[in-house]
Image (spheres, grey):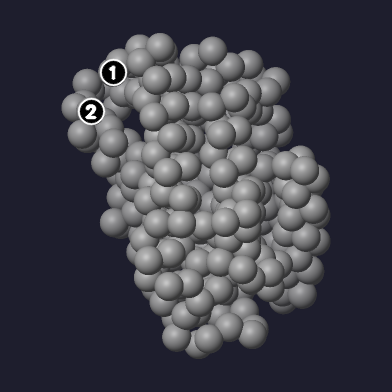
Amino acid sequence: MFKEYCSEKIHLIEAELLTILQADECIEPVLCEAMQYSLMAGGKRLRPILLMAAAEAIGEKGSKYLKVACALEMIHTYSLIHDDLPAMDNDDYRRGKLTNHKVYGEAMAILAGDALLTMAFEVMASQKDVEPANLVRVIGEMSKAAGQTGMVGGQAIDLLSENKLITADRLKLMHQAKTGALFQTAIRSGAILANATEEQIAALTCYADNFGLAFQITDDILDVIGTEKNIGKPVGSDERNHKSTYVSLYSIEKAKEMANDAVNHALEALTIFGAEAGFLRTIVKYLISRNS
């Protein structure tokens, strides 16, 4: 059921993303080609799936909020394009394909990322059949999660931490912002759009925070013991870039223990929900067994 659920949602997301791109006016074909190159390069589509799954945990149909879900994937893709740039992580491959700047050049890759980020908010604003106040709240939260107090702020900490041994608290803050913020806003957004109570939103926020922590710790582990074929990019990039990780600050065994603890805390946060939250329970347990 887990694989079928993901496959069904990925099909919906990718069909909608193509529709969005094809419906948009394009004054420079190369720019739009560069946007589509990264946006349609595959991937787990985890953030939009989580948004829809959170709405379903509240009792709504997740696909009802497909526009907002796709907008979130556009924000995530923009961050990957910029993250791969020579001035950032300087990666040549993403999802098993050449990174955007390797195909279209550094300047066009920057513009493609900029365009995807900006377009995401246009797409969000086009979401139908939701309470206007809920949509405004979601747009505000998503803006914050993507900006200087969220993903971009975390990226800044990451850059300034290269070649330094940082504290565990600093590492946690960096990943809460750089990675965790988009997971949190994905799950909170699905709940808010579905008219969740504040108690439900609080429980899902706790779940999301622990999900993000487990995801990042596992990512750090895979960068050491994973394979390029499975993760879609060269392994060992954290060590080459002299970055502190959960593995370097602790150990692989301790990191695995921390990931397990985060998964258990996430599951505890879902105790107020019934069978509708089944996918959220399954996917957080999947994190500690994933190889990509």
Specify whether 103 is left or right of 173.
right
Determine whether 270 is above or below 251 in the image: below
The percent coordinates of residue 103 (x first, y second) are: 68, 40
Q: What residue type is labelled 1?
A: Leu
- Let me know if residue 128 appears in the view: yes
Residue that label 2 marks? 168
- Helix, strand or loop at disc 1? helix
The percent coordinates of residue 243 (x first, y second) are: 34, 24
Q: Which residue is found at the position 67% from the left and 34% from the top? A: 95
Q: What residue type is labelled 2?
A: Ala
- Quarter residue 58 falls in: bottom right
Which is nearer the N-term, disc 2 or disc 1? 2
Specify whether 236 is left or right of 15.
left
**Around disc 2, counting alpha carbons within 10 Å, would you say few (fewer than 14), some (14 to 19), or many (20 or more)?**
some
**Around disc 1, counting alpha carbons within 10 Å, would you say few (fewer than 14), some (14 to 19), or many (20 or more)?**
some
Q: Which residue is found at the position 19% from the left and 27% from the top? A: 167
Disc 2/disc 1 C-alpha distance (Å): 7 Å
Towards the viewer: 104 or 290: 290
Towards the viewer: 257 or 178: 257
Residue that label 1 marks? 249
Quadrant (top left/top right/bottom left/bottom right) for the C terminus: top right
Specify whether 93 is left or right of 135.
right
- Helix, strand or loop at disc 2? helix
- Quarter residue 57 falls in: bottom right
Determine whether 150 is above or below 191 in the image: above
Could you tell me if the residues under marks 2 and 1 are in contact, i.e. CB atoms within 8 Å? yes
Specify whether 85 is left or right of 276.
left
